[in-house]
Image: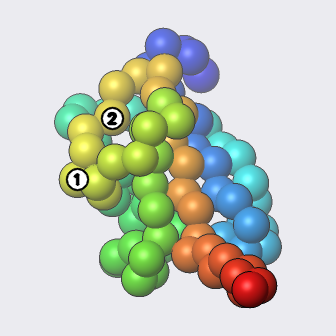
Amino acid sequence: MNTTAVVTIKLFASLAESYGWRERQRALAGETCILDLWRAETGQPELPPRVLCARNMAYCDASTVVAPGDEIAFFPPVTGGSHAG
């Protein structure tokens, strides 16, 4: 696979557990947005509520267009601990 024409896709925490993988590479064919990658890799038509997306370690919208060499990450919703005091 030509590494200049692929993106790396990462799932974290419960998303990785749910889908059974943590990292994949995918070849790009034309203009592709983050939601397109989600659909192709998970088979799900939409992102689950409150899932965060990042492109090259910067949070972004699911409609963000990706480029060869990008790293795309999906993070499940996280809850914080209690604040004592």
Q: Position of residue 64 (x, y in %)?
A: 25, 44
Position of residue 72 measured from the top left corner of the image (x, y, whole percent): 50, 42
Q: Name the residue beneath numbered marker 2.
A: 66
Q: Vertical placement of 47 versus 71: above or below?
A: below
Nearest the viewer among 28 and 79 is 79
- Label 1 neighbour load within 10 Å: few <14, some 14-19, many 20+: few
In the picture, the quarter occupied by the C terminus is bottom right
Q: Is residue 24 left or right of residue 34?
A: right
Of residues 40 and 60, the one drawn nearer to the viewer in this rendering: 60
Q: Position of residue 79 (x, y in %)?
A: 64, 80
- Left or right of 58? Residue 8 is right
Q: Mark 2 and mark 1: span between their CA atoms?
A: 9 Å
* Quarter occupied by the N terminus: top right
Name the residue rendered at 44%, 38% in the picture.
58
Residue 3, horizontal then vertical, whole percent: 56, 16
Q: How many numbered circles are shown?
A: 2
Identify the disc placed on residue 63.
1
Mark carried by residue 55: none
Q: Residue at x 47, y 70 (%)?
A: 51
The 10 Å Cα crowd at callout 2, few under 14, some 14 to 19, many 20 or more, is: many
For residue 2, what is the image quadrant? top right
